[in-house]
């Protein structure tokens, strides 16, 4: 269809791992009661492109495919470890209090699944949150829970600009004193005019500044970083999705072709790379680069976007062998 389209059309490859689990789950049925399982899967995969983290938290981490030995571990221990990793990721990124789903909110420190559902219900009944402290009006969220979760909540249009940063409310007085000291206003923060703030702080003297503001150095540096980029998403630094225009089938592959693909899995013997032909290619550990590699994890991780060359293709057995040798790696 793409070559025949009368407009600029591109496509992107998105992993469908775990989509079938979501489509058959209770949550999937609650979100899309009028859709069948295939339609729910399609929506889930499309949403992954828009906001992968917000969508993947709806699926048990072990269902996404996390390695060849995941079934050899005690499942309780595996769930605990994977749950901890997801929780770290969600808290590192932060969540928009006015758009986050209950599934996403439940991974925040201090927020139980019941409290997460209450936040969504409160939002639907009363409209958008306008400040972080407003979350205290939600049932099952007290001062202690608020203290734990507040720094991870974001409100993009809040009157208090600090509500859209990672600065914890306990540190608001320090942040405001810092802005006042260097004559910055809230509007300066909103408009991104604090590029020189760290330089000014270093010139003033970090140790002296900490004494004057009554805070520790790590806290001060975190506040400066957050003030310089309010509302930032740490994922902005990640590579953008790779948009393609070439529609490929395994029959179209020829030995020597150079393609861009995404690493989908890393095993002891090599890595599987999605190059857009409905069949992952195998990049054997011996073909990963020109030097000796003891284990694939030394050079590749799941999600890496890499260039590979077709080494051989077996259409009948649906096998694709890839190499990166001689490609300057």
Image: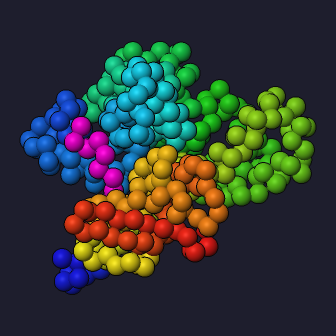
The colour scheme used to paint the residues is rainbow
In this view, the residue in front, 34 or 173, is 34
- Give the x, y percent position of residue 160: 56, 39
Is residue 277 visible in the rendered image? The answer is yes
Magenta span contains residue 17: yes
* Apparent side of residue 76 relative to residue 300 in the rendered image (left or right): left
Tell me the chief SS of the magenta region.
loop
In this view, the residue in front, 17 or 323, is 323
* Apparent side of residue 281 relative to residue 153 in the rendered image (left or right): left
Determine the image quadrant of residue 69. top left
In this view, the residue in front, 166 or 126, is 166
- Give the x, y percent position of residue 260: 44, 69
Magenta span contains residue 248: no
In this view, the residue in front, 85 or 123, is 85
Q: Residue at x 79, y 30 (%)?
A: 215
Which corner quadrant holds the N terminus?
bottom left
Is residue 236 visible in the rendered image? The answer is no
Determine the image quadrant of residue 290. bottom right
Q: Which residues are magenta?
A: 13-21
In the displayed structure, 199 sits above or below 19; it is below
How many labels, in total?
0
Q: Residue at x 76, y 52 (%)?
A: 197
- Give the x, y percent position of residue 100: 37, 38
Q: Residue at x 53, y 29 (%)?
A: 150
In the displayed structure, 207 sits above or below 8; it is above
Which corner quadrant holds the C terminus?
bottom right
Q: Residue at x 23, y 82 (%)?
A: 3
Determine the image quadrant of residue 76. top left
- Give the x, y percent position of residue 296: 54, 51
In the displayed structure, 30 sits above or below 203; it is above
């Amino acid at each position: 269809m793409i070559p025949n389209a009368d407009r600029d059309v591109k496509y992107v490859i998105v992993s469908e791992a775990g989509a079938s689990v979501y489509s058959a789950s209770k949550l999937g049925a609650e979100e899309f009661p009028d859709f069948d399982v295939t339609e729910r899967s399609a929506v889930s995969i499309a949403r992954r492109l828009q906001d992968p983290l917000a969508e993947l938290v709806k699926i048990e981490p072990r269902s996404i495919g996390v390695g060849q030995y995941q079934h050899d571990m005690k499942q309780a221990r595996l769930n605990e470890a994977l749950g901890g990793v997801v929780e770290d990721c969600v808290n590192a990124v932060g969540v928009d209090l006015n758009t986050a789903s209950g599934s996403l909110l439940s991974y925040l420190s201090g927020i139980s699944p019941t409290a997460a559902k209450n936040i969504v219900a409160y939002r639907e009944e009363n409209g958008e949150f306008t400040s972080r402290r407003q979350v205290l009006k939600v049932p099952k969220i007290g001062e202690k829970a608020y203290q734990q979760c507040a720094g991870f909540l974001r409100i993009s249009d809040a009157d208090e600009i600090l509500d859209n940063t990672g600065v914890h409310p306990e540190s608001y007085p320090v942040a405001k004193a810092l802005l006042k000291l260097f004559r910055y206003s809230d509007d300066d923060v909103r408009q991104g005019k604090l590029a020189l703030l760290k330089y000014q702080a270093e010139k003033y003297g970090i140790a002296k500044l900490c004494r004057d503001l009554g805070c520790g150095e790590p806290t001060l540096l975190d506040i400066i970083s957050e003030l310089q980029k309010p509302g930032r998403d740490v994922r902005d630094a990640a590579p953008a999705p790779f948009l393609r225009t070439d529609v490929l089938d395994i029959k179209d592959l020829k030995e020597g072709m150079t393609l861009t693909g995404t690493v989908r899995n890393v095993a002891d013997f090599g890595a599987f790379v999605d190059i857009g032909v409905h069949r992952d290619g195998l990049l054997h550990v011996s073909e990963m680069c020109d030097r000796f590699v003891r284990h694939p994890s030394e050079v590749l991780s799941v999600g890496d976007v890499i260039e590979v060359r077709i080494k051989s293709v077996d259409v009948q057995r649906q096998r694709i062998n890839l190499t990166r040798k001689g490609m300057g790696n």
